Amino acid sequence: MKDKDSQNTIKLLKNLLNHDLKLINFFQSDLTKYKILLLVMISHYNDENKTIEKIIDNLPKDISSRAHQLNCVTDATVKGYLIKEISQSDMRKKYLKPSKKLIIEFEEYLNAFSKN
């Protein structure tokens, strides 16, 4: 018989694997997208404005090319999952923020960790 910690771990993994969160599934389909999601959400919860360039710079260099990283950002913004917000002080700067729907789904996703 499995101990309680093993059962809780299995339950958590099943919760993380078997969810119907469309936006989270989009970001989980690719390691680069998932890392972008995490960086954007960290910025959101820290109430920071991070530019697209800063987010790209913070991605590990060995997981994908810069072109792929930018394509991931573009795909997510075209779908409305991420929002590009132009800086009022410098029109060249574009901040990357999560959509309201993404914030809601991300919080549901995080709840899977606390359901054990």
Image (cartoon, helix red, strand yellow):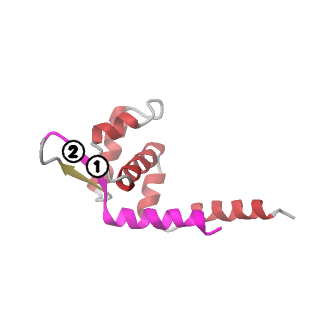
Q: Tell me, yes or no, whether the two marked residues, 2 and 1, touch with CB atoms within 8 Å.
A: yes
Label 2 environment density (alpha carbons within 10 Å; few <14, some 14–19, many ≥20): some
Q: Position of residue 55 (x, y in %)?
A: 35, 40
User: What residue is at 28 percent from the left and 49 percent from the top?
Assistant: 96
Query: Quarter of the image holding residue 92?
Result: top left
Q: Nearer the viewer, residue 70 or 12?
A: 12
- Is residue 104 located in the magenta-colored stretch of the structure? yes
| Looking at the image, residue 47 lies above or below residue 112 | above
Count of numbered tags: 2
Residue 29: assigned label? none
Give the side of residue 88 with respect to residue 35, left or right: left
Query: Quarter of the image holding residue 5?
Result: bottom right
Tell me the CA gap for discs 2 and 1. 7 Å
**Residue numbers of the magenta segment:** 91-116
Amino acid under label 1? Leu
User: What residue is at 21 percent from the left and 45 percent from the top?
Assistant: 94
User: What residue is at 28 percent from the left and 42 percent from the top?
Assistant: 52
Secondary structure under tag 1 reads strand
Q: Position of residue 101 (x, y in %)?
A: 35, 66
User: What residue is at 40 percent from the left and 67 percent from the top?
Assistant: 104
Give the side of residue 4 with respect to residue 76, left or right: right
Amino acid under label 2? Lys
Residue 94: assigned label? 2
**Would residue 18 be seen by someone viewing this image from the given angle?**
no
Give the side of residue 41 with respect to residue 14, left or right: left
Say which residue label 1 marks: 96
Q: Position of residue 53 (x, y in %)?
A: 29, 37
Q: Nearer the viewer, residue 12 or 48?
A: 48
- Is residue 61 located in the magenta-colored stretch of the structure? no
Q: Position of residue 60 (x, y in %)?
A: 45, 34
